[in-house]
């Protein structure tokens, strides 16, 4: 029962972080790759929010998987990122593919930095 509660708590925290980071990454995406609007979704803010949610999803999952030291993390992340990769390739968003790869790298590096700082400060307490 405790393990199921832990997993549920991790999923809820991950979803909340994705929702919280989405506006930040939407603004970031709007400054990197401005969109003038579209056929199906009219305003550029809505497109920025969609692509910002993709960036938030990639960053948060890579950060959480790195912090939790998930075995086969790269395989699981690749499987979870397949829909976004296909969306980028099908929509000819090659620049977005590079931005997503960059967000993945930043999330993993930040997770590793958090782990190393946690080890450092826990070792110095003793």
Image (cartoon, rainbow, N blue to C red):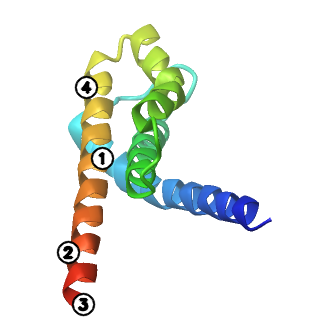
Mark in front: 4 vs 3: 3
Q: Where does residue 72 sit, x and y in percent of width and height?
A: 45, 35
From the viewer's perspective, tell me whether residue 9 is left or right of residue 29: right
Q: Where does residue 106 sit, x and y in percent of width and height?
A: 25, 46
Q: Identify the mark at residue 120; answer none if there is no mark.
A: 2
Q: Quadrant of the C terminus?
A: bottom left
- Please state which of residues 50 and 5 is positioned toward the viewer in this rendering: 5
Is there CB contact under 8 Å for labels 2 and 4?
A: no
Closer to the chain start, of discs 1 and 2, is 1
Q: Residues within 10 Å of mark 3 (few under 14, many from 20)?
A: few
Residue drawn where x is 50% and y is 60% of the image = 17
**Tag 2, which secondary structure?**
helix
Q: Where does residue 29 sit, x and y in percent of width and height?
A: 31, 41
Mark in front: 2 vs 4: 2
Q: Taking 79 as reference, is 21 above or below it?
A: below
Mark in front: 1 vs 2: 2
**Tag 1, which secondary structure?**
helix
Is there CB contact under 8 Å for labels 2 and 3?
A: no
- Please state which of residues 74 and 94 is positioned toward the viewer in this rendering: 74
Q: Residue furthest bottom?
A: 126
**Tag 3, which secondary structure?**
helix
Q: Give the distance between the C-alpha atoms of the residues marked 1 and 2, in whole angstroms.
A: 18 Å
Closer to the chain start, of discs 2 and 4, is 4
Q: Give the distance between the C-alpha atoms of the residues marked 1 and 4, in whole angstroms.
A: 15 Å
Q: Residues within 10 Å of mark 1 (few under 14, many from 20)?
A: many
Closer to the chain start, of discs 4 and 3, is 4
Residue drawn where x is 25% and y is 26% of the image = 98
Mark 1 lies on residue? 108
Q: Where does residue 123 sit, x and y in percent of width and height?
A: 23, 80
């Amino acid at each position: 029962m405790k393990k199921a509660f832990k997993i549920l708590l991790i999923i809820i925290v991950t979803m909340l972080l994705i929702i919280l980071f989405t506006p930040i990454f939407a603004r970031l995406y709007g400054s990197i790759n401005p969109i003038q609007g579209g056929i199906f979704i009219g305003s550029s803010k809505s497109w920025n929010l969609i692509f910002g949610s993709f960036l938030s999803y990639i960053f948060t999952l890579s950060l959480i998987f790195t912090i939790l030291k998930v075995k086969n993390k790269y395989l699981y992340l690749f499987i979870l990122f397949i829909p976004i990769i296909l969306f980028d390739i099908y929509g000819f968003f090659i620049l977005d593919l590079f931005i997503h790869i960059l967000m993945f790298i930043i999330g993993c590096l930040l997770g590793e930095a958090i782990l190393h700082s946690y080890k450092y400060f826990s070792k110095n307490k003793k």
